[in-house]
């Protein structure tokens, strides 16, 4: 899997574009800045947007090529982000550290998804927000991106179960039109969640 992403991210163009995910952008634009964590952040489009809106940004991905492009994008925009090369399964996180955590089209296999979600929640401050946009199982009907393995796609019930200790403020499935670079383009089915750690 690491080799797949290194190959994808070594392209000169930004394969998911340089503009933030729309759901993420709407959230960021509507809350006070703080410290945010973006795991598996790829080429940095969301991290750079958050930094440009006044957030202190920590991000990581296991791809060296992704980090290089993210830091270049940050340099071009004139912002600073802290971006590590790390694997989310093994990366150590401090507890109660972040005002927000966002997973934007980050897909974990059903076998370890709950473990990773719980690990991330422990790093969220009380009063902090957890945001997810991911492809739903219905995405298998479309060719606009995402895993082709149903076990890596999400249903609302998965999120309700994994985040039952948080106050879920927003949770829905929606058909959208994606326009995020070369590999996220066309009709798509996504699940979206915003939850509060009370």
Image (tube, rainbow, N blue to C red):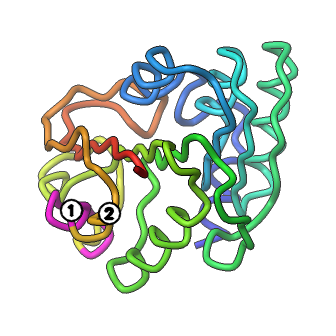
Residue 66 got which mark? Answer: none
* Residue 33 percent coordinates (x, y): 63, 23
Q: Secondary structure at mark 2?
A: loop
Q: Could you tell me residue 87's position as x and y percent? A: 69, 70
Question: Magenta stretch containing residue 134, yes or no?
Answer: no
In the rendered view, tell whether residue 30 sits above or below residue 87.
Answer: above
Name of the residue lying farthest toward the bottom: 111
Q: Is residue 193 left or right of residue 171?
A: right
Q: Which residue is mark 1?
A: 160
Above or below, comparing residue 140 to residue 88 in the picture: above
**Residue, x 21% and y 62% (percent of image)?**
160
For mark 1, give the secondary structure. Answer: helix
**In the image: residue 89, left or right of residue 148:** right
Q: Main secondary structure of the magenta part?
A: helix
Task: Tell me the magenta residue range.
Answer: 151-160
Residue named by callout 2: 163
Q: Position of residue 6 (x, y in %)?
A: 70, 59
Looking at the picture, tell me which residue is in the foreground, 19 or 103. 103
> Does the residue at mark 2 contact the one at mark 1 (Cβ under 8 Å)?
yes
Q: Is residue 165 above or below residue 168?
A: below
Q: Residue at x 60, y 55 (%)?
A: 40
């Amino acid at each position: 899997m690491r080799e797949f992403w290194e190959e994808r991210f070594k392209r000169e163009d930004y394969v998911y574009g340089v503009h933030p995910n729309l759901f993420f952008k709407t959230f960021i634009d509507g809350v006070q800045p703080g410290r945010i964590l973006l795991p598996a952040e790829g080429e940095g489009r969301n991290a750079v947007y958050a930094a440009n809106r006044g957030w202190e940004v920590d991000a990581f991905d296991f791809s060296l090529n992704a980090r290089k492009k993210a830091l270049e994008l940050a340099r071009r925009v004139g912002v600073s982000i802290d971006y590590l090369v790390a694997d989310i399964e093994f990366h150590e996180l401090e507890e109660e550290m972040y005002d927000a955590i966002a997973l934007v089209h980050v897909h974990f296999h059903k076998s370890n998804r709950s473990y990773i979600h719980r690990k991330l929640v422990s790093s969220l401050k009380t009063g902090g927000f957890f945001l997810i946009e991911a492809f739903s199982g219905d995405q298998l009907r479309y060719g606009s991106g995402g895993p082709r393995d149903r076990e890596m796609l999400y249903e609302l019930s998965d999120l309700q179960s994994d985040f039952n200790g948080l106050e879920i403020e927003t949770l829905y499935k929606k058909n959208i039109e994606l326009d995020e670079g070369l590999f996220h383009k066309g009709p798509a089915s996504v699940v979206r969640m915003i939850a509060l750690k009370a």
